[in-house]
Image: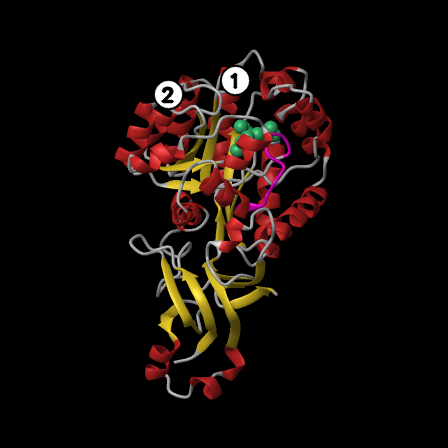
Amino acid sequence: MNYSLILQNISEIFIAEDLSPVLKGPHLLIAADENGKISFVGKSEDFRKTEPGFETKFKDVIVDAGNKAVFPGLVDSHTHLVFAATREDEFAMKSRGATYEEIAAAGGGIINSTVKTKKASLEEIVEQASKRLSQLVSYGVTTVEIKSGYGLDTESELKLLTAIAELKKRFPVEIVPTFLGAHAYPPEFKNDHEGYINLINNEMLPEIKARNLAEFADVFCEEGYFSLKETEKLMLRAKELGFGLKLHADEFHSLGGTELAAEMGAASVDHLEAISDLGIKKLAENGVVAGVLPITSVFSRLPFAPARKMAENGVTVALATDMNPGSCMCGFLPLAASLGATQLKLSVEESLKGITINGAKSLKRDKTKGSIEVGKDADIVIMDSSSVAYPIYHFAHNHCEKVFVKGRRIVG
Ligand code: NIG
Ligand code: FE
């Protein structure tokens, strides 16, 4: 057998499996085969039994973890990191107490980004997004969902999705593209909701499908954005065309979107700060992941989603950044797990699962990503700490030291 990576001298591994998520060392070892798939996880001495003399035989692919803790590549399952301009002017309004809805009413918000995104060239958008994505990778993120949604016309939405496709070519990480044309009504359709829904359903979605530019379709179901009925029309059409479904729901008001998306078999419903008890029950019953975004709650002064209650009622909880220029200008995913363990009352293990295996479930990538198990991709992060808890306990600091994707080193 040949190997792409033999990582030895590991203190602890967050394997992220359900029953006992942490493997304690010392002297643990992970091996990846020549295709970059994990072929062994366990004690060095056990590996030696099947590969005697591996230290000399495979010395070219051996990496010493320095008695540090190892994680699966982190999964940021909800971002809007492709956009053209930042909005620190609105941040100043926010600092004086303005709400998200007041800022939107004053011409800010999603539409403000849309105006700038329409004007920017594809190259400019890719350059800006590359910089943000490099930052995420330096934190240990190896799988990331990226949404469109700042174009709001066919040409501009295609431009954003093309930018995401370009990022896929430039970065060795797993990028999952989501179409969010239903992020807001553009000004020209303010009084013609049906017209915009028809544009999405009859023009944008089929074109995006034909060009294979998105895997999921998403809608912002909220007062002042897309109503429950409108959301249903959009999700039905997306499902009919073969897109996976995601939904922004219950951020400010509970309109029934969560319940509907759960019944329609969405991969995840995200935000959920104002989720109802029925919504929690429906997510659990239908095995739909809750995408909780605690950094957005901090940045936008929103209540935290009731993640503890969700977990206790059998809902799979993913934690993501929501990185976007309005409600959460932060892509530091480990912070979402720190807030999970401090503000959401999730355990350390639940919080870490939120940014690994549960994120992978929300992107339908859990067969290949999100945990350290034999047969999965060797997407692995070494953190500069001896325990798996430390990187989220010593919070808001980047502890990531080395990152591997499919057994190949990409950071450190
Ligand atoms: O997920 N809630 C809707 N959309 C984004 C915010 C986008 C923006 O303000 O630019 C979010 O929080
Ligand atoms: Fe979002």
Q: Quadrant of the N terminus?
A: bottom left
From which residue to which does the magenta span run?
325-333
Helix, strand or loop under label 2: loop
Residue furthest to the top in view is: 191
| Residue occupied by mark 1 | 195
Give the residue type that dot 2 points to: Gly
Could you say which is closer to the camera, residue 199 or residue 66? 66
Could you say which is closer to the camera, residue 207 or residue 363? 363
Q: Quadrant of ligand 1?
A: top right
Badge 1 density bin: few <14, some 14–19, many ≥20, Cα 10 Å = few
Question: Would the CB of label 1 be found within 8 Å of ligand 1?
Answer: no
Q: Earlier in the sequence, mark 1 or mark 2?
A: 1
Determine the residue positioned at 53% across, 21% down: 196
- Residue 256 shows which numbered tag? 2
Secondary structure, magenta segment, majority class: loop
Could you say which is closer to the camera, residue 2 or residue 63? 63
- Residue 370 shows which numbered tag? none
The percent position of residue 9, horizontal first and vertical second, equals 47, 73
Helix, strand or loop under label 1: helix
Total numbered circles:
2
Give residue 412's quadrant in the image: bottom right
